[in-house]
Amino acid sequence: MKSFQVLTLFGIRILIHPTFFILPLFFALFYGYHYGSAVGFRAFMLVVLIFVCVLLHELSHGLRAQKLGIRVPSITLYPIGGVASMQKIPKEPWQEFSISIVGPLTNFGIAAILFFPLYFTIGPDALYSPSLETWPQTLANVFWANPVLGLFNLIPAFPMDGGRILRSALSGHLGYLRATRISVYFGHLFAILFLLLGIWKQHWMLVFVALFIYTSASREEKYAVYENELERLKKDSENASG
Ligand code: ZN
Protein backbone atom coordinates (compact mmCIF):
# COMPACT_ATOMS: atom_id res chain seq x y z
CA MET A 1 0.00 0.00 0.00
CA LYS A 2 1.31 3.38 -0.99
CA SER A 3 1.57 6.24 1.49
CA PHE A 4 0.14 9.55 0.40
CA GLN A 5 1.40 13.04 1.00
CA VAL A 6 -0.58 15.39 3.24
CA LEU A 7 1.76 18.35 3.49
CA THR A 8 5.37 19.51 3.28
CA LEU A 9 7.17 20.95 6.31
CA PHE A 10 10.68 22.46 6.06
CA GLY A 11 11.12 20.70 2.73
CA ILE A 12 10.19 17.31 4.24
CA ARG A 13 7.21 15.53 2.71
CA ILE A 14 4.78 14.34 5.38
CA LEU A 15 3.22 11.05 4.29
CA ILE A 16 0.45 8.98 5.83
CA HIS A 17 0.27 5.25 5.31
CA PRO A 18 -3.30 4.09 4.53
CA THR A 19 -3.22 1.68 7.51
CA PHE A 20 -2.64 4.69 9.78
CA PHE A 21 -6.40 5.39 9.81
CA ILE A 22 -7.13 1.98 11.37
CA LEU A 23 -6.02 3.28 14.76
CA PRO A 24 -8.18 6.44 15.26
CA LEU A 25 -11.15 4.68 13.64
CA PHE A 26 -10.71 1.61 15.82
CA PHE A 27 -10.54 3.74 18.99
CA ALA A 28 -13.52 5.85 17.89
CA LEU A 29 -15.67 2.79 17.14
CA PHE A 30 -14.56 0.84 20.21
CA TYR A 31 -15.15 3.67 22.71
CA GLY A 32 -18.19 4.93 20.79
CA TYR A 33 -19.81 1.50 20.91
CA HIS A 34 -19.11 0.95 24.61
CA TYR A 35 -19.45 4.47 26.05
CA GLY A 36 -21.41 6.55 23.53
CA SER A 37 -20.59 8.79 20.58
CA ALA A 38 -19.18 11.72 22.63
CA VAL A 39 -16.53 9.47 24.21
CA GLY A 40 -15.91 7.86 20.81
CA PHE A 41 -15.22 11.27 19.29
CA ARG A 42 -12.85 12.21 22.13
CA ALA A 43 -11.00 8.91 21.63
CA PHE A 44 -10.63 9.75 17.93
CA MET A 45 -9.31 13.24 18.69
CA LEU A 46 -6.95 11.89 21.33
CA VAL A 47 -5.29 9.54 18.81
CA VAL A 48 -5.00 12.41 16.31
CA LEU A 49 -3.42 14.73 18.92
CA ILE A 50 -0.95 12.07 20.07
CA PHE A 51 0.07 11.60 16.45
CA VAL A 52 0.70 15.34 16.18
CA CYS A 53 3.22 14.79 19.01
CA VAL A 54 4.67 11.79 17.15
CA LEU A 55 5.00 13.96 14.05
CA LEU A 56 6.81 16.68 16.03
CA HIS A 57 9.15 13.98 17.40
CA GLU A 58 9.99 12.76 13.89
CA LEU A 59 10.27 16.31 12.60
CA SER A 60 12.91 17.06 15.24
CA HIS A 61 14.98 14.08 13.99
CA GLY A 62 14.52 15.34 10.44
CA LEU A 63 15.51 18.92 11.18
CA ARG A 64 18.58 17.85 13.17
CA ALA A 65 19.66 15.58 10.30
CA GLN A 66 19.14 18.39 7.77
CA LYS A 67 21.30 20.65 9.94
CA LEU A 68 24.06 18.04 9.67
CA GLY A 69 23.74 18.06 5.89
CA ILE A 70 21.69 14.86 5.56
CA ARG A 71 18.76 14.99 3.18
CA VAL A 72 15.42 13.97 4.70
CA PRO A 73 12.97 13.29 1.86
CA SER A 74 9.98 12.29 3.99
CA ILE A 75 8.36 11.38 7.28
CA THR A 76 5.74 8.61 7.18
CA LEU A 77 3.11 8.07 9.86
CA TYR A 78 2.14 4.45 10.51
CA PRO A 79 -0.37 3.21 13.10
CA ILE A 80 2.56 2.12 15.31
CA GLY A 81 4.44 5.42 15.02
CA GLY A 82 6.41 7.62 12.67
CA VAL A 83 9.53 7.01 10.61
CA ALA A 84 11.79 9.75 9.24
CA SER A 85 13.54 8.48 6.11
CA MET A 86 17.08 9.78 5.77
CA GLN A 87 19.35 9.68 2.77
CA LYS A 88 22.00 8.12 5.03
CA ILE A 89 22.54 7.27 8.67
CA PRO A 90 25.64 9.07 9.90
CA LYS A 91 28.52 6.91 11.06
CA GLU A 92 30.04 9.64 13.19
CA PRO A 93 28.91 8.72 16.74
CA TRP A 94 28.22 12.30 17.77
CA GLN A 95 25.98 12.91 14.73
CA GLU A 96 23.95 9.75 15.27
CA PHE A 97 23.66 10.58 18.97
CA SER A 98 22.44 14.11 18.35
CA ILE A 99 19.90 13.10 15.68
CA SER A 100 18.55 10.37 17.99
CA ILE A 101 18.37 12.26 21.27
CA VAL A 102 16.34 15.22 19.93
CA GLY A 103 13.25 13.01 19.40
CA PRO A 104 12.72 12.01 23.05
CA LEU A 105 13.81 15.52 24.13
CA THR A 106 11.04 16.95 21.94
CA ASN A 107 8.45 14.86 23.81
CA PHE A 108 9.80 15.94 27.20
CA GLY A 109 9.74 19.54 25.89
CA ILE A 110 6.09 19.24 24.75
CA ALA A 111 5.15 17.85 28.18
CA ALA A 112 6.96 20.74 29.90
CA ILE A 113 5.22 23.29 27.66
CA LEU A 114 1.78 21.73 28.19
CA PHE A 115 2.08 21.28 31.94
CA PHE A 116 1.37 24.77 33.30
CA PRO A 117 -1.32 25.84 30.79
CA LEU A 118 -3.15 22.54 31.43
CA TYR A 119 -2.61 22.72 35.18
CA PHE A 120 -4.18 26.17 35.35
CA THR A 121 -6.95 25.70 32.77
CA ILE A 122 -8.21 22.17 33.41
CA GLY A 123 -7.04 21.98 37.02
CA PRO A 124 -4.87 19.45 38.84
CA ASP A 125 -7.76 16.98 39.34
CA ALA A 126 -8.33 16.53 35.61
CA LEU A 127 -4.60 16.59 34.88
CA TYR A 128 -3.87 13.76 37.30
CA SER A 129 -6.89 11.65 36.30
CA PRO A 130 -6.64 11.32 32.53
CA SER A 131 -9.65 9.63 30.94
CA LEU A 132 -12.07 10.15 28.09
CA GLU A 133 -14.93 11.29 30.33
CA THR A 134 -14.44 15.03 29.71
CA TRP A 135 -12.42 17.12 27.23
CA PRO A 136 -10.02 18.37 29.96
CA GLN A 137 -9.29 14.78 30.99
CA THR A 138 -8.82 13.87 27.32
CA LEU A 139 -6.24 16.66 27.01
CA ALA A 140 -4.52 15.34 30.13
CA ASN A 141 -3.89 12.12 28.17
CA VAL A 142 -2.01 14.13 25.55
CA PHE A 143 0.22 15.53 28.29
CA TRP A 144 0.96 12.08 29.79
CA ALA A 145 1.53 10.47 26.40
CA ASN A 146 4.64 12.62 25.90
CA PRO A 147 6.86 11.44 28.76
CA VAL A 148 5.72 7.90 27.92
CA LEU A 149 6.71 8.36 24.25
CA GLY A 150 10.01 9.95 25.27
CA LEU A 151 10.93 7.20 27.73
CA PHE A 152 9.73 4.36 25.49
CA ASN A 153 11.90 5.62 22.64
CA LEU A 154 14.92 5.75 24.96
CA ILE A 155 14.75 1.96 25.57
CA PRO A 156 17.88 0.60 23.83
CA ALA A 157 15.80 -1.49 21.45
CA PHE A 158 17.73 -0.77 18.26
CA PRO A 159 16.72 0.82 15.85
CA MET A 160 14.62 2.87 18.26
CA ASP A 161 16.28 6.09 19.43
CA GLY A 162 17.72 4.50 22.58
CA GLY A 163 19.29 1.75 20.46
CA ARG A 164 20.90 4.30 18.13
CA ILE A 165 22.23 6.16 21.16
CA LEU A 166 23.68 2.85 22.39
CA ARG A 167 25.37 2.26 19.02
CA SER A 168 26.79 5.78 18.98
CA ALA A 169 28.18 5.21 22.49
CA LEU A 170 29.80 1.90 21.49
CA SER A 171 31.05 2.63 18.00
CA GLY A 172 33.85 4.95 19.12
CA HIS A 173 35.58 2.07 20.96
CA LEU A 174 34.37 -1.02 19.14
CA GLY A 175 34.00 0.24 15.60
CA TYR A 176 30.78 0.73 13.67
CA LEU A 177 30.12 -2.88 12.68
CA ARG A 178 30.62 -4.42 16.13
CA ALA A 179 28.64 -1.60 17.75
CA THR A 180 25.82 -2.27 15.27
CA ARG A 181 25.89 -6.02 16.00
CA ILE A 182 25.66 -5.50 19.76
CA SER A 183 22.87 -2.92 19.34
CA VAL A 184 20.98 -5.27 17.00
CA TYR A 185 21.34 -8.00 19.63
CA PHE A 186 19.64 -5.70 22.16
CA GLY A 187 17.05 -4.76 19.54
CA HIS A 188 16.17 -8.44 19.04
CA LEU A 189 16.16 -9.09 22.78
CA PHE A 190 13.73 -6.25 23.50
CA ALA A 191 11.62 -7.19 20.48
CA ILE A 192 11.17 -10.69 21.92
CA LEU A 193 10.35 -9.23 25.35
CA PHE A 194 7.81 -6.82 23.81
CA LEU A 195 6.32 -9.69 21.81
CA LEU A 196 5.84 -11.86 24.89
CA LEU A 197 4.54 -8.95 26.94
CA GLY A 198 2.17 -7.97 24.12
CA ILE A 199 0.76 -11.49 23.85
CA TRP A 200 0.51 -11.89 27.61
CA LYS A 201 -1.27 -8.55 28.13
CA GLN A 202 -3.16 -8.89 24.81
CA HIS A 203 -1.67 -5.56 23.79
CA TRP A 204 -1.62 -6.08 20.01
CA MET A 205 0.02 -2.79 19.24
CA LEU A 206 3.07 -3.86 21.24
CA VAL A 207 3.15 -7.10 19.20
CA PHE A 208 3.31 -5.07 15.97
CA VAL A 209 5.96 -2.77 17.47
CA ALA A 210 7.98 -5.90 18.44
CA LEU A 211 7.79 -7.32 14.90
CA PHE A 212 8.74 -3.94 13.45
CA ILE A 213 11.77 -3.60 15.77
CA TYR A 214 12.92 -7.17 15.08
CA THR A 215 12.77 -6.90 11.28
CA SER A 216 14.20 -3.40 11.04
CA ALA A 217 17.07 -4.30 13.40
CA SER A 218 17.93 -7.28 11.17
CA ARG A 219 17.72 -5.11 8.07
CA GLU A 220 20.08 -2.50 9.53
CA GLU A 221 22.56 -5.22 10.52
CA LYS A 222 22.56 -6.62 6.99
CA TYR A 223 23.07 -3.16 5.60
CA ALA A 224 25.99 -2.44 7.96
CA VAL A 225 27.63 -5.76 6.97
CA TYR A 226 27.10 -4.98 3.30
CA GLU A 227 28.56 -1.49 3.64
CA ASN A 228 31.53 -2.85 5.57
CA GLU A 229 32.15 -5.43 2.84
CA LEU A 230 32.00 -2.73 0.15
CA GLU A 231 34.52 -0.61 2.01
CA ARG A 232 36.83 -3.60 2.44
CA LEU A 233 36.65 -4.41 -1.28
CA LYS A 234 37.33 -0.78 -2.13
CA LYS A 235 40.40 -0.74 0.12
CA ASP A 236 41.61 -4.06 -1.35
CA SER A 237 41.29 -2.80 -4.91
CA GLU A 238 43.03 0.45 -3.96
CA ASN A 239 45.90 -1.53 -2.45
CA ALA A 240 46.05 -3.81 -5.50
CA SER A 241 46.13 -0.92 -7.97
CA GLY A 242 48.45 1.19 -5.80
ZN1 ZN B 1 12.66 8.91 17.50
Image: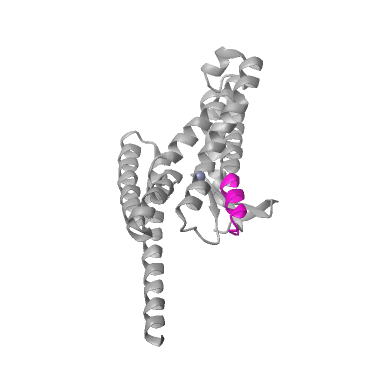
Q: Quadrant of residue 237?
A: bottom left
Q: Quadrant of residue 153?
A: top left
The answer to whether residue 233 is above or below residue 95 is below
**Residue 212 appears in the rendering:** no
**Left/right of residue 119 with respect to residue 89 in the rendered view:** right
The answer to whether residue 178 is above or below residue 22 is below
Magenta segment: does it hold 69?
yes
Residue at the front extreme?
242
Residue closest to the eye, 107 or 126? 107
**Left/right of residue 92 with respect to residue 16 in the rendered view:** left
Residue closest to the eye, 240 or 194? 240
| Residue 219: x %, y % from top left | 40, 60
Q: Quadrant of the C terminus?
A: bottom left
Residue closest to the eye, 142 or 86? 86
| Residue 64: x %, y % from top left | 59, 49
Residue at x-position 61% and y-position 39%: 52
Q: Quadrant of residue 120?
A: top right
Q: Which residues are magenta?
A: 59-71
The rendered magenta stretch, by its main secondary structure, is classed as helix
**Residue 21 appears in the rendering:** yes
The mark tally for this picture is: 0
Residue at x-position 49% and y-position 58%: 89
Magenta segment: does it hold 168?
no
The answer to whether residue 73 is above or below residue 226 is above
Q: Quadrant of the N terminus?
A: bottom right
| Residue 196: x %, y % from top left | 30, 40
Residue at x-position 59% and y-position 52%: 75
The answer to whether residue 115 is above or below residue 225 is above
